[in-house]
Image: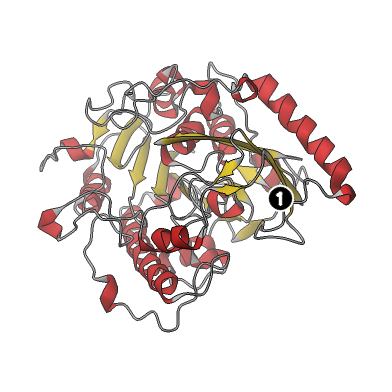
Amino acid sequence: MKPMNILYLHAHDAGRYVQPYGFPFETPNLMAFARESVLFRKAFCVAPTCGPSRAALLSGQYPHQIGMYGLPGNHQGWVFDDYGKHLVNQLNKQGYQTVLAGAQHEGNHAEHFPEIEYERVLEREEPVREQDGEFYPETINKVEAFLATRKDERPFFLSVGIDEPHRDNIPRPELNLHGAGDRFSKTRYYDPDKLDYRYTAPPPWLPDLPELRKDMESYREGVQIMDEYMGRVLYALKHNGLEENTLVIITTDHGIEFAGGKKTLSEQGTQVMLMIRGPKGADTPFTGGKVVEPMVTQLDIYPTLCELLGMKVPQKLEGDSLLPLIAGQVEALHEAVFMEQTYHGNLEPLRAVRTERYKYVRRHLPVGPLMRADGPSSRVMEKIGWFDRPLGHEELFDLYLDPWEACNRVADPDYAEIKVELSARLDAWMQETGDPFPTGIFPTPPNE
């Protein structure tokens, strides 16, 4: 087999609210892909905001280990401690042609992120956009052209970062997008007032109010746009004869942009879609419409690629290869998974450990959530009193009896042993990974 191509196809703020995970959103391209791939039912990011989450996936280390405590580059200024850890820079050494189309959130847009050495950045090619590394309506056209015309014999790593279903926080007057965050699309205009939300349910952990149903119907629109874009990339891969030798990874950075989702360590903030397929023409385990139940995290992607490619990297990888799990050689990869949050504009340090049944959260500040979600439904929830509640420094949830994490069991004597065990696990993880959380002293954003 020739060295495999890698297509990293990633959405923005999608969580796992797509059809292959059983949610009532029509995503026919993702559904067809799921039936040919391996779908991970309990896949988690390790941070519920874009920069830290993506940086962890593409370095194989936790955000605090690489210095990515919040928004990167020209936002808050967070950067890797060493961009030699970035997957792209390692694949360059393996002889890959590395190509970026659309969004990335690991480096500085304004300075064209020279520290991440993509050989080609399609937004820099005609027609050139002012801010490369962002997603535009014509980004998929450029991806289709790349797949149709490439003559390079080297394997490629193609990162396609789709901004949907992120809210429209970038004004684009030429598309009638004003950047107010009231629709779930950054590249296509639609009028939320013209959507029929009479038969739509709100996010299941939030109240059934008309404003929330309307916002959820808008989310459905954004997810369908995302599915269309992903479908076009997968179609081009197939019809240019490339899927037989291409490993395709489909995921997103973190949970959906509603109160209690993104910017929290809840299930709705940290659960993500993760499906991997191919290469179709090789004897690999990433085929056949398999569904894998045990917990995995996005940190497991990097070591999986290292095993598939026979690649050695300089840093210690915190995840484990997925190959033994999907081959049935082990029953589970992780007894526990860990998550973190520090900055996203505001400082709200949180750490959590999750086992199959329980989640223990430690909060540096006893009041929260502090970070507001964007959009109209967040304003509704703020009036109700969702934010700035006295939550205490510790939370413990029984996810089997309380999947929406509504009842904190940290003071319940029936859960005392579980609290002690999970607290010790979290302490050990923070010590092993050099987390500053126990000190309460956190780096200041470089741009402040």
Question: Which residue is under mark 1?
Answer: 294
Which x, y percent locates residue 441? 55, 20
Against 182, is 409 above or below? Answer: above
Question: Along the horizontal axis of the image, is 417 left or right of 440?
Answer: right
Q: Dot 1: few (<14), some (14–19), or many (≥20) neighbours within 10 Å?
A: some
Which x, y percent locates residue 88? 40, 28
Q: Quadrant of residue 46?
A: top right
Residue at 38 percent across and 31 percent down: it is 106
Camera-side residue of 197 and 379:
379
Against 192, is 109 above or below? Answer: above
Which x, y percent locates residue 315? 55, 18
Question: Along the horizontal axis of the image, is 71 left or right of 57?
Answer: left
Question: Along the horizontal axis of the image, is 324 left or right of 388?
Answer: right
Q: Amino acid at mark 1?
A: Pro
Q: Quadrant of residue 349?
A: top right
Against 87, is 125 above or below? Answer: below
